[in-house]
Amino acid sequence: MKTGIKKYLFVDRDGTLISEPPQDYQVDSLAKLKIEKGAISAMRAFQGAGFELIMVTNQDGLGTESFPQADFDAPHNMMLEIFASEGVEFKAIHIDVNVEGSDAFTRKPNPGMLMGYLQSGDMDTQNSYVIGDRESDQELARRMGIQPIRYGQFESQEPGLSWDEIVSQILSKPRTATVERKTNETGIAVTVNLDSKASNEISTGIGFFDHMLDQIALHGGFHLNLQAHGDLHIDEHHTVEDCAIALGQAMRQALGNKRSIGRYGFLLAMDESLAQTAIDLSGRPVCEFKDEFTLDAVGGLSTEMVRHFVHTLAVNLAAAIHVDVKGDNHHHMVEGVFKSLGRSLRQAISKNKQSVTSSKGLLE
């Protein structure tokens, strides 16, 4: 299944968003309508985090003589008005009306009502969820290939989570990604955790390059595990290039749709040298690199490959990166580039309260 960029929250209605309604809907059930504790604030938090809210519910026999449409509409519309008054919008509402016991493809746990999302190719299947209080909701998630979360407790089934616990479980999830790249020239394995400052584990076979990658992660405020094996008996080109490719791809995956990030970042002085790095995680790869290098290499790393590393990282991270470095000591100049790149990334990947740092509403 193709994994896209949209995060969906498929949410059950009865027993999850609202308390289980009486067996027989009556217009006077408006007075009995009860929103589940924490449901409104949870929906607002998920919406702010970039999830599209989709309500999915079975309403057996709706529209029949025993369950008139009007008896359903009054409390349902009131519920929607309450959520809307708090700024919560459900992008779609899917209701199956088959009689109880029907095995129709549209009835939960069958995914018939939701096939459009599965076939569109734009769903982020690793970060989309089905939330409900019944086993049918859990099974629906499994059949869709996304994650199930049980809310509350229904009848004798296992107890589920409160809305506060569900919000914490989903939104506190670390921004992590792993990329493995294998070619005839190199083998690279990269794992990043943008929300961890654990000690880095880096081995490329080029000591100075290891130190520079560590500076990016250290000053970037994220954890990096990068293990590389390359054809260093030829030169360092393939190893450095493929490390930049894998690192850029891993960071891009970990950032997801980039909601709530700083997006931009800036510069650093390194003794007599000055390295200025500006970054924009815009989704549009550009690299401008100006330098005063006069030595061919520093610590086994060619200065040409410093430029190439930054350019390759920009392409695979889908970022605009501008670097301007000057000075007298080439060790300081190169280290200043990597440290300033890390400091720029720290600002750019940091979370803020704004949903998307773009008037367009998305970064891609």
Image (spheres, rainbow, N blue to C red):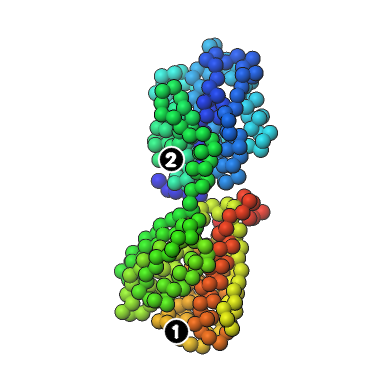
Q: Is residue 345 above or below residue 209?
A: above
Type of the residue with mark 2: Gln
Determine the residue positioned at 39% across, 36% down.
143
Element type where label 2 sits in the image: strand
Q: Is residue 312 above or below residue 91?
A: below
Q: Residues within 10 Å of mark 2 (few under 14, many from 20)?
A: some
The residue tagged 2 is 147
Is residue 121 in view?
no
Element type where label 1 sits in the image: strand
Name the image quarter holding the C terminus.
bottom right
Type of the residue with mark 1: Ala
Residue 317 is situated, as x and y percent measured from the top left of the image, at 50, 63
Q: Are marks 1 and 2 in contact (CB under 8 Å)?
A: no
Residue 316 is situated, as x and y percent measured from the top left of the image, at 48, 64
Determine the residue positioned at 64% across, 32% down.
83
Label placed on residue 297: 1
Residue 145, located in which quarter of the rendered image? top left
Determine the residue positioned at 40% across, 81% down.
300
Give the CA distance from mark 1 to mark 2: 49 Å
